[in-house]
Amino acid sequence: MTMPGYKTKLEHIAIAGAGRLVIQSLLDRQQYYDPTGEALRRGICSASWPLFGLMWPSGVQLATQLAQRRVCPDERILEIGCGLGLASLVGQRRGAHITASDCHPLAETFLDANAKLNDLSLLTYRYGQWGESAPAADQYVERHGLLGIPLHEEGVSPFGSAHARTGDVSDGDPIVRDRAVPGAGFSEQTLSGRYDLIIGSDLLYEPDMPVTLSAFIDRHANADAEVWIVDPNRGHRNAFSRNMTHFGFALEEDKRLDDMPVITEEGAQEYKGRLLRYRRQA
């Protein structure tokens, strides 16, 4: 599939438990193509624009971990910051009910292309962003305090919505509705609903991420939920765990992935990082 405005390549990634996948990615990170200004309106500068379109080692690790998880037909899974969507594609191939989300205006285009390359049906995709550039509905930090401590609203659990175990509106949720992303040039539907398992990789890359990411996760996690984050030791892990406790999430596993190299066409690449697994119970 041709992607106007930039150069791409095909990468073949072998995932234990899910087989080999073909992923279309950007040829390199020295590209920037934002003719309508959509990325800029979302706070994505020229330096960070191409980062969504590269195959990051932590994304491969997340896909590998998900491939080993038993598929539960009633479980709703959300990948945040999906980028090229490798983990979501693995979930789709294995029959999981998974929604992919990202804030980059081209993420859905690449996700669709990669689904077709692997003979998979198109995945559900939603716009999801946290931090300063997020829509007002996702701005938990100012309303809920520096650490994102949730308000105890009448009739609502302090650890998530009272309507538990609902997915996105596409799952038949009669309460939460998708809405258009505000601002010119935004065409995707905004992420809504709550999920049983939320996954993501290499998301703690800025000092403010522990606050904003944990609040975003709380917004989209069921009262009884699990969270998997693969982190390449960027240094914000402990702060993130502290913020997660304010939303009722306990760190159940801190698994070193140092003995799990990333296998690509170029061969095995050493990896240093962790799988952080959190859980909260209603």
Image (cartoon, rainbow, N blue to C red):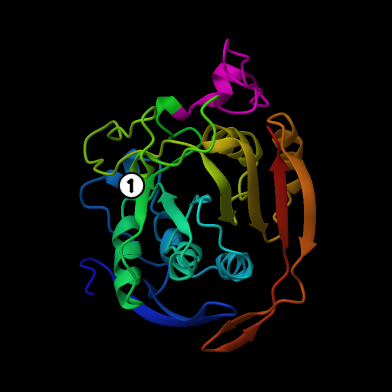
When asked about the image quadrant of residue 22, the answer is bottom left
* Quadrant containing the C terminus in the rendered view: top right
Q: In this view of the protein, which residue sits in the foreground, 62 or 16?
A: 16
x then y, percent, for residue 141: 58, 25
* Residue at the (56%, 62%) spot, across then down: 71
What is the tally of numbered marks visible in this picture?
1
Which residue, as the protein is rendered here, is positioned at the far front?
Answer: 73
**Is residue 75 shown in magenta?**
no
Which residue, as the protein is rendered here, is positioned at the far top?
Answer: 154
Q: In this view of the protein, which residue sits in the foreground, 161 or 143?
A: 161
Q: Residues within 10 Å of mark 1 (few under 14, many from 20)?
A: many
x then y, percent, for residue 18: 52, 77
* Residue at the (63%, 70%) spot, across then down: 68
x then y, percent, for residue 16: 60, 80
SS under mark 1: helix
x then y, percent, for residue 90: 49, 69
* Residue at the (36%, 39%) spot, across then down: 172
Horizontal side of residue 1 vs 100, given as left or right: left
When asked about the image quadrant of residue 244, the answer is top right
Please determine whether, in this image, residue 51 is positioned above or below residue 12: above
**Is residue 157 shown in magenta?**
yes
Q: Amino acid at mark 1?
A: Ala
When asked about the image quadrant of residue 254, the answer is bottom right
Magenta stretch, main secondary structure class: loop
* Quadrant containing the N terminus in the rendered view: bottom left
- Label 1 sits on residue: 39
Which residues are the magenta region?
138-161
* Residue at the (77%, 45%) spot, across then down: 251
Horizontal side of residue 38 vs 252, given as left or right: left
Q: In this view of the protein, which residue sits in the foreground, 250 or 234?
A: 250
